[in-house]
Every structure is written in C-alpha cells, then in structure tokens.
Amino acid sequence: MQHPLFPAMPHMGHGGDYNPDQWLDRPDILEQDIEYMKKSHVNCVSLGIFAWSVLEPREGEYHFEWLEQTVERLYQNGIYTMLATPSGAIPIWLARKYPEVRRVGRNEVRDEPNGRHNHCYTSPIYRGKVYQMNKMLSERLGKHPGVIAWHISNEYGGECYCPLCVAAFRDWLREKYGTIDKLNAAWWTTFWSRRYADFEEIDPPYAQGEHCVHALALDWKRFVTYQTNDFVLHEKEAIRVGGSELPVTINMMNAFDGLNYFKFKDTVDFTSWDAYPTWHGETDDLSTACRTAFVHDWIRAIKREQPFVLMESTPSMTNWQRVSKLKRPGMHMLACMQAVAHGADSVQYFQWRKGRGSFEKFHGAVVSHDCRSDTRVFQDVQSVGERLAALDEICGSRVKAQAAVIFDTENRWAIDGAAGPRNCGKHYLETCMQHYRALWEMGISTDVIDMECDLSGYKLVVAPMLYLLRGGIAEKLRRFVAQGGTLVGTYWSGVVDENDLCFLGDCPGDGLAALYGIRAEEIDALYDGEFNHMEACSRHLLKHERYKLTELCERIHPEGAKVLARYMDDFYAGEPALTVNRFGEGRAYYLAAKAGMKFYRDFYCSVAEQAGISCPLSEELPEGIVVSVRQGEGKDYLFIQNWNAQPASFELKETLSDLETGKPVHGKLTLDAYGIQILMRER
C-alpha cells in the first residue's frame, strides 16, 4: 500500500524555508508572498526556523500572533506548514543572561553570543527554555489543520566541551563500561602510560589534550551523537506534552560525519536532508549526480522504504561554495526530479525570498531582491511545481532496493582516526561511492546502510573497507550469505572490534576470514600516482584482462576461496587480488585492493546478474543516462535522467507509458540536455 507522509496533504510537496519574521514591517511583501507561492504551485513551507528573537524578544515576553496569522493565511490559500522549533539560533538576551547555554570550544574557551548553533545540549537552562518554547508552540499551533509536521531545530551538529558536557560524558562512560578497569582494557590505555584510576580523570579530546588513545576519540563522537539525539527527544517530548502528535523530522546534511544519523532512526518519524551539490563544478555533473544520489539513498535508508523530504535545496546558486555557479537550463528540474526518483515526496528550497542583509543575502532564492516573478529562476521553480502537482500517483510510493552498500559513520570515524596505513588518504567515503556508482549507473536501486541495519530482503550487500566491526555485523553477513545472498567485501576489513582493538588471530577477524575463505597477511600503501595492476584469471566474470590498482593493496592467501584475479606488479605479483568463496547457499567475494571504475562497472555487471538482480531496462544506455525506479501499487515508475549537457538518445525495446501524458513510448527515446522523462510499467 502507498501511504503519503502527510495524510492531510496527500500530494507531492513543493515549497521552502519561509521567513515572514524578517518582513513584518512590510505587509505588501507578505501579500506578494502568497500571490507568488500560488503562482509557483507552492503547497508547503517550513516556518519559524530562526524566529526565537521575534517570538520571545525579551525573557517571558511572547509574540505568537504573527506566527498564528501566517499559518492561517497560508492555510486559507492552500499552503501547508512544517512548523519549526527555533532552537537552532538562540536570542542574544538568553546567551548573555545565561552564559552556560553557550558552547565551549575544543580549545576550552566559551563562545561569545554570536551566529547560530551556539548552544550546549547539556545545559539545564537551555533545555528548560527550549522545552517551554516548544510546548507553547505546540499548544498554540500543534493542532491547526494547516500544520502537517514539525521541523525540529536546524541542521544539528557541533560539539560542546563545557564542564556540564564533560560531566555528562563521564557519566555516559560509567554507564557504558561499568568499571574503570573495563574502560582501561577497552581503550588499551597502558600504551604510553595513559591508564585512568577514576572516571573523573577522563577529559574529552581537547585541542591540547589526548589524541593518541583512539578509543577515547571514538567514544567522544559516540557521546556527541547520544547527547544530540537525547536533545532531539527532549524537544519532541515538549511538542507531545503541548498536545501535538504530528510527525517530526530533523534536517540532516550532505554526507555529514559529525553525527551518526542512523542513531536517530527511532527518534524521527520521517527523514529529510539539505542538498547543495556543486553543479557544473570541478567534477563532471554525472559524478556530482552520483554523489547526490548516494546521499539520497543514505538518508532514505534510515527509515527503510519510507519516502523522505528534500528539506533544503537552492533554486539557483549558493553563496558559500568556493565558486557559486548558476544552474544551467534544465538542471533545476533534473535535480529536483532526481530527489523524487530516489524517494522524496517533497522538494523544498532554501530560501523562498532573499533577505536584504547579513550572511545569506546573496544565497539563491525563489524570489530575489527585484521582487519579480518573470525571472528565469522563478519560472524554473514554477515548472517544477507544475510537474510535481501532476505526480499524485507517485506520492507515497517506495524505492525497494535489491542491493545495499554498507557505509557506516562509526567505521568512518575509526578509519579516519587510525594512524596508518595511508595517512595521506584512505578515502572510505569515496570508495563506498565508487562501488555504489557502478550499481547506480545500471539503475539498480540500492540502499546505503550502516552495520546495525537488517540485511533481509537484499540480494547483494557490498561492504567496502569494513575496518571496525560492530552491531553484530559479522554474524549478520554470515547469515546473509549462508541463506543465499551475495556479499562483496574488500581490503582493510575486520581489523578492529567496536572499541578499536585489533582482533587477534586470522584477519579479517570475528570469523570473516572463514566467510571470505581467505587470510589477510599485510597491506601495502601506494603513493599518489603509484599503481599496481591485477590480471583476471579468466574472462568469465570480467570483460577485460587488466585493471589498475591504487592506494592500498592487501596481501591475502586463499583458504578455500577461488582466485579470480592476481596482482601483476611488485614483489607480490602473482598473488590473489580478487577471490570468491562459496559459503552455505551464497557467495562472498573479496577484493584485496583499491580498483577503479573500469573494474567496478565490469565486476558488478556480472555479480548483479549472478545475484538475480535485473536492471530496470535491458538496453545498453549511453553514458550519462541513468534510470531510477519507484514502485507503486502494481506499477513501476522509471525516471530516465540525462546528466549530459547535450541531448542523448537510445532505442527503447519495450513499450512503456509516459506517466505525464499517458502516451505509449517505444523506439527511439531522446532526452534534452539535463532532461528527464518518467515512464510507467505495469508490474
């Protein structure tokens, strides 16, 4: 069954961040906003994100009337509201009167009242003030028919090293380890005589503090995620106490590593994120599109198969990227539809109208300083709105992935923190994206998951550089393969446990060596510009005989696995570089070195076929043409995307229906530059 995210608004959402609090002295602007929103088919806005200083200009003095009037006026004009809590930016009176609410930096210096995200998640005073504000907002507007969801705070992130947070960190460690002896054992603190006699001796990794106990840094990051999530729950509780049961979300960020977002899975009711790709930049648009798709699938997988919201995107350009380029004609539509193709049920912008001053006055917006609606950007937004309005049939449909790539934030922390084997870049994120790209280019729907996720339902699981093992992942992988699944693992896997302690015995540890049928002995690091190569043992799996290898090359010994390719260079020439092992009913592949896209494309084309995964189209597509699929009730919706700056064509073998025109489509299909067409197939 298809279930829209917002039952009160069973349509594809379209809108953006709306800041009427910046224009309360201009009723003509507020009237024009309504006129222009209706003209551009906006049906949903985020409201009140940074409005605390207007809602409560002085302690205990509240002004909700303007907000209530705005919500009502929007609703009367067919526009719904995702109501924000304003905790992302605290008013100056609060920061000055109660210094403890301000963060202390890693340098142990308390921040001055400035900017946004300048608040301590542990401070009882800050928690109390936020709770009071959220509860009042919920009481006043939580049951208004025009409010459909809660947008809690804004882009959570950052760390606080104040005494309150340090004390909370020590309490968190006590709860986790129980005794100081267990902590010392888990952290391997005898190294360099770093043993602790008491939890009170433990400090976070200050700028001038301890940096060589890797488990300390890892647990600090885990604590920051825990404390942030606890604060989100605190905000959510105030909303519930205020009487509102509407769904809540937090707007996440692009491949952000400051928090483990999967820990928020049970806290939020739906996921959302802020996408600001650098289109037409130093990398080609196809690569940028792949990175964006990767994050779409990462955020969506947190609430598996459930639609998400593209909470922020720019309708034109940003003002903070190194070079702020305009979107070329067609790119805005394509980028918005890409989000929909990967499961978004709403496309939102930052921002609706450009402000006149301060940091983001030149950030892209639907309405610019000229206040006109005949601009290229406005008309692009209008076109997206018209198209989304015709896609009610897709609203609530799902992306059902047959494959998954494990991209684990805690593993990322551990790899980035490890000293060796290649300190000029181990490139975990980029490696995961390369494996993902091969599947994405074939149109194979893929979830990007972490180690705690359930693997059932997938036919193929890719686990690149699974350095740190946690969440019972080794047992889940064994069970997955034994039951007939196909697994692809790589070098630098199964090295340490969840406490960053190296496994003793054969590597990969925790039984993964037996799963892969190999034993890893040592790993060689290559300089930038230095290469090795591998040669396929046969052409059955790989199209080409020779593939380039870079960065990391692991020396492995087969212990039951079949060798598929061998190294060609250096003293380990002739040794295995790629193997496969039968385990139960399934297969486990092991790639011992960092390869390139030529290899990944050839390899995954064969592996996907062996795993029983079919591409959505059987045709060989031109470079830059990508297909993404959403599944409705008995129907597949195929989003055919052209990421080229020129038209592209291919022959469509079967007859499908154009979702938007209802006309049959067969034979030569031509897409404009940055064009997209949505086809429908009965399933």
Image (spheres, rainbow, N blue to C red):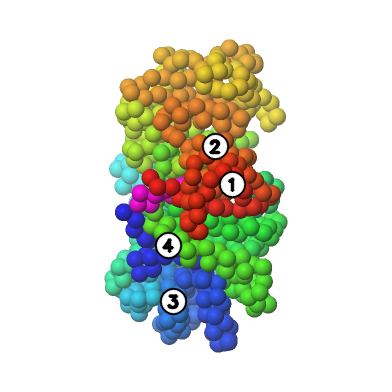
Q: Residue 69 at x, y = what percent?
A: 44, 84
Q: Which residues are magenta?
A: 629-636
Q: Nearer the viewer, mark 1 or mark 3?
A: 1
How crowded pointer 2 is (Cα within 10 Å; few <14, some 14-19, many 20+) is rated as few
Alpha carbon of mark 1 to alpha carbon of mark 4: how far?
A: 25 Å
Q: Amino acid at mark 3?
A: Gly
Q: Which residue is mark 4?
A: 392
Which badge, 1 or 4, is on the more N-terminal residue?
4
Q: Nearer the viewer, residue 265 or 617?
A: 617
User: Eyeballing the image, is 493 above or below 227?
Assistant: above
* 175 in magenta: no
Mark-to-mark CA distance, 4 and 2: 29 Å
Q: Up-down: is 313 above or below 598?
A: below
How packed is label 4: few (under 14 Cα within 10 Å), some, or many (20 or more)? some
Secondary structure beneath disc 3? loop
Q: Amino acid at mark 4?
A: Asp
Query: Which residue is under mark 3?
Result: 78
Identify residue for label 2.
619
Q: In the figure, is residue 13 to the left or right of 5?
A: right
| Residue at x 68% of width, y 77% of height | 370
Name the residue tied to disc 1. Answer: 669
